[in-house]
Image: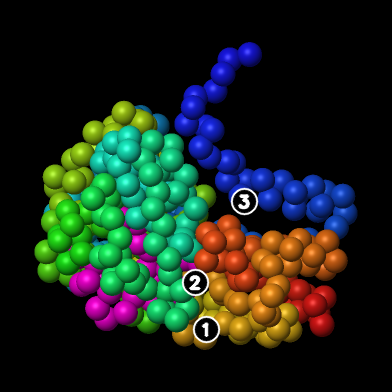
Amino acid sequence: MIEVANRLQTVEEYYFSKKLREVAALAASGKPIISLGIGSPDLAPPAKVLEAISESFTHPNAHKYQSYQGLPELREAMATFYKTQFAVDLNPTSEILPLMGSKEGIMHISMAFLNEGDAVLIPNPGYPTYQSVTKLVGAKGVFYNLDAENNWMPDFEALEKSDLSKVKLMWVNYPHMPTGAKPTETVFEELVAFGKRHNILIINDNPYSFILNDAPKSLLAVEGAKDVCLELNSLSKTFNMSGWRVGMVMGSAEHINHILKVKSNMDSGMFFGIQKGAIEALHCADTWYSELNKVYQERRKLVWELADALDCTYDKNASGLFIWAKLPEGVKSEAFIDKILIEKNIFITPGTVFGTQGEGYIRFSLCATSEAIKETIARVK
């Protein structure tokens, strides 16, 4: 038998990859499973996006290899989007790189900047992929704890007291997943200053900006941010295009060029039609966001009712596609979700998926119909 690479000894299969098989098996056996587990939007993209991809099929370039940097008009649309929505100026030729989903950007950035033995600051709780990719490239993950008392913001005083000598990169994610915490007025400025003091590359993973959030912000809006910062963004949540796999990374031309060296060896360009659809999405009027959020507002109220029925507490000021809820004192996250899955046929994500700081919490997704959420409330009550 061929031995696998040593790097595979450092990671496990992604939690949702395993758990969703279990949930699917229960559903296949006849259980009436309702999933409030993952953040895969169930709503359709804008109609003009679907029209654009359909019309693209007859274009003479539709089925050819595409540029590693994406269509020039796609990068122009991304630059215009950032200027309009975040007041950030970006050179579409050199400071934007389209991605096949922002998740691949986490790998590309890590491969471009990390050597074996380098240290990486990773939020706890936070997106599990930051840690797994860090391990896969041979770097060392160093968790920095976030907690409700500090509104899930970094504790810079604690960070300054830690050993930062080998830290090369820091992952941040605001609006925060899984908690929904919005960035404070000063946190992005503090992050830029922290990165400059310690020569650390700060990456803000920013796919939840427009979901139940009236004031989208970008780390790149801070003066001097491009010197030490990158930002990832995605069309998955904002435009209901998660399966399309369209993301982007923005930053200085130098940083983007390093990432391009990796990416250009990993794929042969994004499908032409998907790029055409993405361009249309990025040109959507502001009414798109308001109409989308009306749906999520209705669902959020129902999930709050569900959380109340489960004796959970939560922050009504949080944003994003999820409700982060604290369980009653002493209740363990994974034991709770397994119990409710078996007894009530409801799948909810345990907070421990996102780190040790998630113990005692659960995360509800808003990517289910109001009717489905009402049914979960009925089952619980």
Mark 2, residue position:
179
| Numbered badge on residue 16 | 3
Task: Judge whether residue 101 can be spotted in this image.
Answer: no
Query: Which residue is under mark 1?
Result: 315
Residue 178 lies within the magenta run: yes
Q: Quick one: label 3, few (<14), some, or many (20+) residues within 10 Å?
A: some
46 to the left or right of 248: right
Instruction: Give 309 or 150, whichever is nearer the viewer.
Output: 150
- Would residue 202 appear left or right of 222 to someone viewing this image? right
Instruction: Say which element carries label 2.
Output: loop
* Lower position in the chain sequence, tag 2 or tag 3: 3
**Image point (61%, 77%), residue name:** 326
Residue 179, above or below 98: below
Q: Counting other residues with Cα less than 10 Å from the Cα at mark 1, is it few (<14), some (14-19), or many (20 or more)?
A: some
Q: Which amino acid does label 3 sit on?
A: Phe
222 within the magenta span = no
Q: How far apart are marks 3 and 1 (CA)?
A: 25 Å
Magenta segment boundaries in residue numbering:
170-192
Pointer 2 with pointer 1, Cβ within 8 A: yes
Distance, label 2 to label 1, CA atoms, is 9 Å
